[in-house]
Image (cartoon, helix red, strand yellow):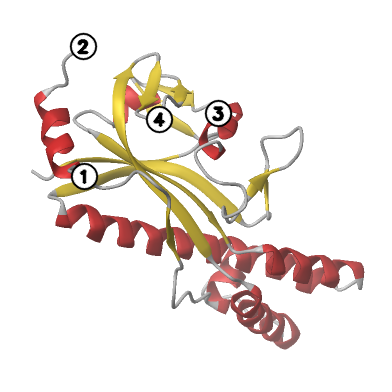
Amino acid sequence: MMPSRCEAANRVAFGNRMEEAASFSPRGIEVSPERVLRILGYGPDMPVRTEVRRTAQAMAGLAMTAATPRASYRRLLIDSCTPEGLALSTGTRFRGPTFSAYLAGCGEVAVFVLSLGSRFDSTQRNLAAAGRTLEAYMLDVAGWLGIEEATRLLKDHLYGEAARDGLVLTRRLAPGYTSRVDGRKVEWPLEDHEALFSLFDEATSPARLLDGSCAMTPKMSRSGLFGLRPAP
């Protein structure tokens, strides 16, 4: 099947760029103690005990000390995108109607794996093992805020890279997450994590799949893809 005009334009923009994995290390990640407290249910005007506030401040700082954020990503051409699923130039296939709904006009995708690193996990485990439950829980909250910030920085990096090629990013799609398609919620099957991780060298990927599971380790990890389409 011949590529669409949008796909053809993206293939020209892609040029001779290699489809090998690239690395990105998010810098300047900050976790606000106030955001940790908000997630714990403390409103802006609610009183917070001094001990709780100090713990939130300490764990927000520890999260960023323990984190070693790193991402691997690949920009890959799209071979086909139909209501049945997405096929990439590597032969990799992802299932479901999510892609045809959100990747219209895209000629390529940026597939990524991102993690805060194993040191973060071990730091939290040590707190829990020592019976420091509140600190372990707050560190967990701070970690998820950190992975959100790292994802934003990765998206900014990809946005700048795409802009130099005259492209823009779509929203992020990820295995195990739902999107709304034709008025109904549709999930990208979590089992497709295996296909996504097959795109990366296990020795250099910042995360891997647990044996016999589609869950990622380290715990504070994220994966997914962005579509790239010509800028309007």
Residue 229 placement (x, y as % from top left)? 19, 39
Is 78 left, or right, of 16 in this rendering?
right
Considering only vertical position in the picture, is 152 above or below 210? below
Mark 1 residue element: loop
Q: CA distance from mark 4 to mark 2?
A: 17 Å
Instruction: Find disc 1 in the rendering and name its residue.
Output: 16
| Amino acid type of the residue tagged 2 in the rendering | Met
Residue at image position (45%, 48%) is 112
Instruction: Find disc 2 in the rendering and name its residue.
Output: 1
Which is more N-terminal, label 1 or label 2?
Answer: 2
Labels 4 and 3 touching (C-beta < 8 A): no
Is 17 left, or right, of 7 in this rendering?
right
Instruction: Find disc 4 in the rendering and name its residue.
Output: 90
Which is more N-terminal, label 2 or label 3?
Answer: 2
| Amino acid type of the residue tagged 3 in the rendering | Asp
Instruction: Find disc 3 in the rendering and name its residue.
Output: 192
Instruction: Quadrant for residue 176, please give it.
Output: top right
Labels 4 and 1 touching (C-beta < 8 A): no
Labels 2 and 1 touching (C-beta < 8 A): no
